[in-house]
Every structure is written in C-alpha cells, then in structure tokens.
Image (spheres, helix red, strand yellow):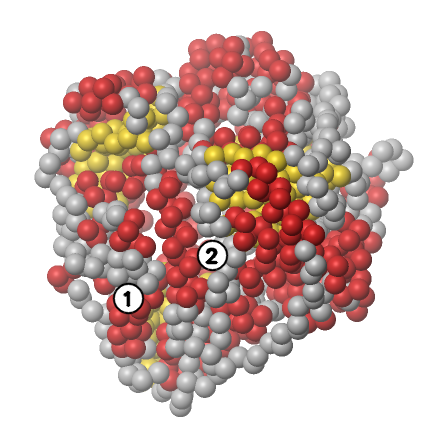
Amino acid sequence: MRFYKTGFAALLLAAASQPALAQSSASVATIAETQDKAPIWAFEESDLPVDPDFRFGLLPNGMRYIIRHNATPEGQGQVRFFVDGGSLYETEKERGLAHFIEHMAFNGSVDVPEGEMIKLLEREGLAFGADTNASTGFEATTYKLDLPRNDESLLGTALMLMRETASQLLFNPDAIDRERGVVLSEMRVRDTYSMRNTLDSFDFFYPGARFTQRLPIGTKEALNAADADTLKGLYHRIYTPDNATLVVVGDFDPDTVERLIKTYFSRWEAPKAPPEPDAGPVDLERKGLTDVYIDPALSERVTAMRNGVWKDEPDTVANRQIGLLRQVGYGIVNRRFQRLANGDNPPFRGAGFGTSDTFEAARSTNLIVDSGDGEWREGLTAAVTEYRKAMEFGFSEGEVAEQLANIRTRLESAAAGADTRSTASLTGAALALVDEETIPTTPQTALERFEQFAPSITPETVLAALREDVIPLDDPLIRFEGRTAPEGGADALRATWDDAMATPVEPDSIVENADFAYTDFGPAGTVVSDTMDERLDIRTLRFANGVRLNLKPTDLKQDRIRFEVNLDGGDMLNTRDNPLATAMIGNLPLGGLGKHSYDELQSITAGRNVSLSIGSDAETFRMQGTVTPEDLELQLDLVTALITDPAYRSQGENRYRRSVADFFARKDATPSSALSSEEGGILSDGDPRFSLQPEEAYLEQDFAKLKDAIADRLEHGAIELALVGDFDPDTAIALVAKTLGALPAREEDFLPYADNRQRGFTTDRSARTLYHKGEKDQAMLRHVWPTRDDSDLQEAVKFALLERVMRLKLTDVLREELGQTYSPGVNSSLSRTYDDYGTFSLTAAVKVDDVAAANDAMETTVAALIAGSIDEDTLLRARRPVLEQLENALKTNGGWMGLVDRAQSEEERIGRFLATREILESLTAEDIRATAEHYLSPEDRLEITVLPAETDAESDAIGDE
C-alpha cells in the first residue's frame, strides 16, 4: 500500500520525489522461496538497488519484518510495529476506533495485566511519551519503542509487548470507560481554530471524499458508543499478520533479532486483512467555486487548487529522474516567491506552489499565498503573475544551477556521513518502504545516479517535466481564510484571479550572483591559552582578543560539526524600563549584511551547508547550527559578518510586524495560548520583563531601537564558540583565528548583570481565572509553586526526580483512574539565571464540567505524596529513565554540546554532570517526599484556571472556590 498526504496539507512536501536513503538486494535471500508469487516488497519490481545492510523477512503467516544493525547512537535501538490499517478502514459507527484501539494497547493484554505495560517499560528505563508512543493515521497505526540499551533481555521484552499488541489485547469494559475519557480529552484538546479550518478546507476541496469523514480522532457519537464488541471487531479485522510489519533498527545482532522475531510472532494466526479502502471519490471536474472562511485567530491565506487524475508511479530509476526534474522546477518557482517575500516591499509574507498525491484518489496542484491582513489582493496578483511567468517562459540556467547545487550538496553530505546515519533516519527509511513503497537506496548510489543524470537537467527538460506534472490552474477552486472577510467577498477573489491570469506577462531579467564579500576580518588572532580538561577531554582555548574556543572532536557523526556561538547580552538586556529591547533579534538575519541582502545571501550560499540565525537566550545571544568540515570556514565568515556588519534592512522589520499581528490574534484562541500569554505577568506581579506588553508596544519596535540596544554587545561583548563533531582541531583553530579571533579586543568575561538577575514570585496566592476564546467545553488548570534556583546540585537532582515521580502520580490519577485528561503535565524549572528563583507546576487540560474534580485530584495527589505515598516501584519507574538518559547523554553531538558550549564560562557544569548519577542513585523516597513537603505546601500554591470567555458567571464561581 502507498500512503499519500493530502495535496492541501503537503503543498511543498510532495512536489517531486527526492533521491532516497538506504537499502539493497542481497538481503532478499530470506524471502527467496516466495519469488514465484506476488511481490512482497516494492524493490522486487524496481531497478533501484536496495541497501544491502537491511535484512528483509517474511514469516509463514504473512507478517513482514525489516532488521538493520546500526550503532549511531551506540548501544541503543528502535522497535516499530506497523499495522497497515487506520481510520480509513472504519465504518460510520467505528469512527475514531482505530485510534481508540491504539490507546487500549497500553491497557492490558492476555499476558500483561491491565496498567502494567507502561510500568514494565518504565522499570526498563523507557519514559512514557518520550520512548513509548504510538500514532494512528488515515491508513496506518504505528507503535514505537525507543530502547535505551541493546541487551537481548530488553529487546525480548519489547518484542513480547509488540506481540501482545498484535492479537492479545483485552478490552475490559472498565478500562474502555476510563480510556474513553482520555480519548475524548485528546479530541477536545485538538479541537482548535486550526483543526476547524482544516476540516472546512477538506469539505471545500474534496467534498464527499471518504478521508474527509475519517479523521483519526473520530466522532463523539462513535467514541461514546464504543464497547468491547465494536472495538474487537475492528481490531480483529485490521490487526492481521499479512497487514503488519515489524521494524527493528539499532545496535543489535541481526541474527539475534531475527530469531526473537520468529520466536514471538511465528504462531500469530488471523484471517486475511480486508481490501484497502478507497479514500475518495474526488471530483476532478470541480472548479470555479470560491469559499471564504473566517476565524479571528487565522492569518490571511488564499489557496487556489485543481484536482486531477492520480498517477501510479512506482519507485524506479526513471521515475526518480522525472521526479528530480519536477523537484528542480517547483524549487525554482518557490525560490522566486521567496525572493519576492524578501524584497523591500513584499507583496506577501510567503507563497508556495506544488503538486502532490491525495492518497490514491487524485493529484492536487496548489498555489498558496500568505499575506498580511487586507493585503490578499496584491499578494494573489503577484503570485499568479510569477506562476504564469514560470509556466510560459521557463527558467534560466542560473536558476537551475542553484537548485542543482543545493541537491548535490545534500546528496554529497549524505554520502559522506553514510556510515554514521542515525538509527532514527534508518528506521524512517524502513517505514517509508512499508508505508509509501519508497525504496531505500544507499546515499552513495543516490549520489552516483544524480551525477549521471545531472547533465540532462536543463531549463528545457525542467520546464517540460513541470508542465507535464502540473494540473493547470484554469478556473480553480479558490479558498480564502483569515480574520476578516476580503473586501468584495468571493466575487472580488475570483475577479482578482481572473485579472491576474489575463494580464500579459513578460520574462524577468537575469540577475547575476555576487561574490561573497566577507572573507577578510584582519590579521589572524593568536592563541594565548590552550588547555585540556582531562575529565571529558574538552579542549579550551582563548585568543588574544578575548574570544574563547571550546573543542570536542567526536566520531559520532561523520562529516558533521555542531557549532554554537554565545555572545554576551541576551535577555539580560531586557530591563523594566525597556522590556522589549531584544524582541526583534530573531529577525536580524532577515535584514542581511551590509554588503549583501538576505536574498543575495541565499543565492550566494546555494549548495553550501551553512545557516544564518540568532536568538536571545537568558544571558547570551546564541547562533547555532550544523555544518560540514568543508563549509566551516564559510559558516564562521557568516557568523563573524553578522556580528560585525548587520544591515538592519527593512525586510526583517516587515516580517516581524506581521508576526506580531498573528500572535495577538491567537493569544487567547486556546486555553494553552491564553495561559502562556498571561502567566508570566501573574507570577511576576506584572514585571514588564516577563509580562506580555500591549500590541502597540511590539509594533513600535524597529531596527533602529534594536541597534541601540545590541550594538555595544556586538562590538564588545564576550564571545564563546563551541565546536563538536568531525573536524581537525588544528584546522578549526586556524579558521577561528582568521574570523572571530581576528576581531578587535572583546570583553574577556560575560558581564554579571547583577541588577537584572532579580526575579520575584508573586506574594498574592489568590486563585486566578483567565478566559479563552476556544471551544466552550475546554478548560485548563495549573497549580504553580515558587521553588529555588539550581545552584545546589543535590537539590536540583531532587527536583528532577520529584518531577518524574509527580508525573507518574498525576498520570495515574487524572488519566488512568479518572480518565479526565489526555496528557497531564508536570514541570520543574530551577533557574540558572535568576537568583533564588524557580517554579514547580502541575497542568491539566480538562472539560469545563470537570474543573472542580480535577482541581481536587491535583490537590489530593500532592497531599498524598507529601504524606509519604512514594513506593519503591514508583521511585524505580521515575529514576530509571533518568539514569538511562544520563548513560546515553554523550552518545550524540547534541548531548556533548550541552557541556561544551560554555565549557569555559560555566566550567562547573562538567563537574555537575559527572556527579549527577551518583546523587540520583542515592536519593530515597524520603528525600523526594521531604522536598515536596518543603516546597509544595498548599499555602504557597497559586491556582490558575482558564475557562471559556462566555461563561463568566460560572467562571467566577469556580475561581472563588
């Protein structure tokens, strides 16, 4: 079966197939005896060579499996149980039951008592949600276990649980009733303005199609009526061996994995799976209609679409070549849109053009235009004009070359890092074969095929492929969404489209790319200090100008270097008098550099693995990303140029202001957004640094104010650069010396900002009620306590374990016992920045009618924990996943960066990391109970309730309780 996203949702994702990941043919030996029968795997009928390191198998009962050894990260693995059946397989009375079954999989089976599956995994070190999860889509259900260790016992446990899920689930009526509340809670949480907008768009573009009436979440009527018989009926229909595939990728011996799979799954017997349902029908003649959908939380968007016949294009060399031509064509059109959006007076915020499959029912070509409020007419006209230019006049050699450079670089980078591909990426490749019949090839063969075909990729061949693929947007379906109706309504939308299609167009003149202007920052700096921290072999250097450099070469990821630059300032520049000083910092790169606009930089850096971004952290401005050794010099040039010569062009201001309007339109559209918007002000008694300011205050910001706020930090602030990954230290030091090391003298230390490190927690503990504008049955509760900062490691580890214990307790009560909430939250946040400041919070999204009961349950849970209700099993299930995380923390470059980034300015973090395990293992239930007793007293708790805006009277009553 092949799975396709809807054309509407996959505008830019499925414009063309791309060269794939990994696989081969030698491993087909395990199914050689079936070669005289119907194909089992897509690669059996393709000329693409499968990556030989995958092992493919078929059990006599029809269940398939895929195995792959991979040691990145070392000593870990992933298990995926893929059931080729989702919500499309449901009858009208079963809507939502495929997802309901997924939930029931964690509620007991023949050999695993109810409530024990998650606990069993937690005892093995898997955290629920992070390492133990599942998902249900239109066509498939996938169960996911991420294993923190590669011992055979744990793998056997994982496969046993997947086998139980396959056919041994129990549907106890009491468990069904409890889980029903959880599923309905998930439905309630997902019922947002965004979801309602999506449903309306489905009904407009694909009326009558089955998939529009089979969203995985289902309907309240079907979920409320579900019982053991209806759930079992669907379960036994779609959970069959010939409808299932098991994927195991990780640091395991493949022979051992295969033996265990056969041991657990060979005796599974069930009837054949039902035929694949049709996701359609889709009316291919539907055109010329216009729809307007208004919601106060939506930003302005116009979508034009035509549907056409679905094409069955198996994954072959020839089809990948055609797909590559299409990819280049769509890429050029979207790059033109991007160039317009980056201009001085952009006609739109962004636009996109693409064609994608709508399951196997149709193909859909989309032109989507995102505009500022009231600017849809200009945006739509500009996008239609650019679309017509492309389709009529084609592309330049330079445009094709830019796209090919980007594609070639991705393929070369993948080939260079082939031996250290992550387990997650290889698992994804295996599932893509099962789910989409995309054949995983090796990165090297993908690169070779590209280079062989590249000479055939010309402006002419690209245009021909694009014209052949696009469904002409003649008299399309047009849909508007936004906060306010377009002036002139549907007629104006249609007239604007027609005018834009009728107006003559001329080809654009070709713009030549400039050479990069930032390669000389003065004489290279000299190293004045060079030491090695022997604890973790982190090398630290200091240049004569004060710049610090931290190095950690690893072999964890071939041809990849993670970099992070910390520049003094960050949120410390936000003061009570100027709380929005750094509000625009994220838009600074959009203003470009003094000698290059942002758009020019995109063309100049085409085909290079570099990035340009900056954000404001609590104490620093942070620039980070991943680069290849070949492009490290250019990356350092870019970082240094942004620090020394930011241009502050208006393009960044335009993007910022539009984002402000969108944020304020949505700030109270859901309970969670209303809470996040107001909580900072509540907790800080209105401290402007942590409170949402009026919309006008954000709109008054400009680059001139940002420059005033940050210019001194850019010129003088301390800099600490960290590099982790596959690099030669001497080469890296030399490159840093001629970039950041060549700058004029900097401040040697990060400033203390003592006056700005004070942050208070409100002394007013009266209950607060906030209001949201979402659905009337949605509410949210939060209990918050003040705690402390993280300066004491012993206390910090206690809080980390308390958070885990409390999450288990709260989940048991609110989710498992009462079935009130989909995902209760617990968070401990001890500040590294603000003296003696921290918070501990419990959060639950519930029905309005359940607010009082949930409030009582949260209070009772905390009180019971303080009274001493932490048994040893709970402590084990809380502690074990944290220990496994510590054990695996330094098996990725990202994990290393958490220690290397500030290895000089915050050197103590290395010692804290090394001491954490011993402290964690020594903590007792009494330690955790005592911490809760000390900090989580009822008198210190602040309760915040978020209710629908229209229930003022009821809300006041609840808030007063």
**Closest to the observer, 415 or 794:** 415
**Closest to the observer, 383 or 851:** 383
Q: At 44% from the left edge and 13% from the top edge, which residue is drawn?
A: 177
Q: Secondary structure at mark 2?
A: loop
Q: At 50% from the left edge and 82% from the top edge, which residue is drawn?
A: 517
Judged left or right of residue 366, residue 955 is: left
Please name the amino acid that badge 1 sits on. Answer: Lys
Res 489 visible: yes
Please name the amino acid that badge 2 sits on. Answer: Thr
Q: Earlier in the sequence, mark 1 or mark 2?
A: 1
Q: Residue furthest bottom?
A: 523
Task: Check contact, mark 1 vs mark 2: CB within 8 A.
Answer: no
Q: Which quadrant holds the N terminus? A: top right
Q: Which quadrant holds the C terminus? A: top left
**Closest to the observer, 226 or 255:** 226
Q: At 35% from the left edge and 44% from the top edge, which residue is drawn?
A: 664
Residue 348, image x and y in percent? Answer: 52, 54
Residue 21, image x and y in percent? Answer: 67, 53
The quarter of the picture where residue 705 lies is bottom left
Judged left or right of residue 657, residue 266 is: right
Rounded to the nearest whole Å, what is the CA distance between mark 1 and mark 2?
40 Å
The quarter of the picture where residue 674 lies is top left
Circle 2: is it few (<14), some (14-19), or many (20+) Cα within 10 Å?
Answer: some
Residue 488, image x and y in percent? Answer: 53, 40
Q: At 53% from the left edge and 19% from the top edge, which residue is drawn?
A: 219
**Residue to which mark 1 is pinned:** 705
The quarter of the picture where residue 814 lies is top left
